[in-house]
Image (tube, rainbow, N blue to C red):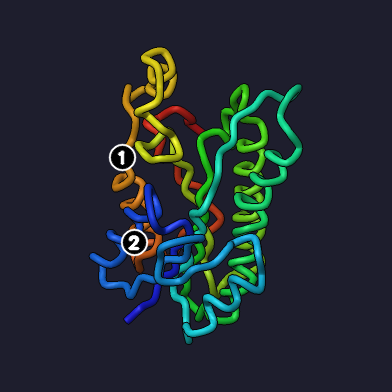
Amino acid sequence: MRVAVVTGATRGIGRAVCDVLARDGFDVRGLDLAGSALQADVTDPASVANALAPLPRIDVLVNNAGVLIEGALATMPLADFDRQVAVNLRGPFVVTQAALPKIPSGGRILNLASELAYLGREGASAYAATKGAILSLTRSWARELAPDIVVNAVAPGPVNTPLLGIEAMTPEERAVEERNPLGRIGQPGEIAEVIAFLASERAGFITGQCFSADGGAAMH
């Protein structure tokens, strides 16, 4: 049975990805800071190495864990900037580096970017920058690891997850999130299905690409 490791697995997109990959026949191992089968801090190499040690192989790695801390350029504490860089950028690097010796030929690495990597947003420059960097990592790793391992990314738009926090939004804030051609916020399962396709044998001739699942907000 093929093994999939998903970071940030206990809620939102990560949990949906675990469910969909399990449906597709994967032995899914969630990696999260708390409350999952493999408990680890993705920013800590020793923690990640310890969590992955029992796994003899990893056929699919999904780098999903991420944080969003909004704040204006003029006032954002440097600690908030550093935290987003640590989780959103250092995290995928640390986890992928630890997992790489276990990924066989034909394996998949899938990174979660964001529509904001393309669009940017006021008050979210640090987050957008880390997701833009994920696109660069994806393209570089795709070249470096070819032809044995394919590497792709998925860039969701606003998705109904705890990270987005729809329940706390004003009607005006929600209207901003729904400002895309499809006129709505996505669901975690819709993102998970894109990831499941990229994890499948059907996607064997695709590498170095980013698939946008954002209701058409960023057309590129």
Amino acid on which the number 1 mark rests in the picture: Gln
**Residue 146 percent location from the top left of the image:** 59, 69
Q: Which residue is mark 1?
A: 187
Q: Residue drawn 73% across and 41% down?
A: 79
In the visual, does 111 lie left or right of 172? Answer: right
Image quadrant occupied by the N terminus: bottom left
Report the side of 186 relative to 61 (left or right): left
The residue singled out by tag 2 in the image is 18
Q: Determine the image quadrant of residue 187.
A: top left
User: Image quadrant of residue 22?
Assistant: bottom left
Point out residue 104 in the picture as x, y percentages from the top left corner: 50, 81
Q: Position of residue 196 (x, y in %)?
A: 34, 59
- Give the CA separation, mark 1 to mark 2: 15 Å
**What is the crowding at mark 2: few (fewer than 14 residues within 10 Å), some, or many (at least 20)?**
many
Q: Are the residues at dot 1 and dot 2 in contact (C-beta closer than 8 Å)? A: no
In the rendered image, the residue lying farthest to the front is 35
Residue 205 x/y as whole percent: 45, 63
Q: Provide the secondary structure element on which disc 1 rests.
A: loop
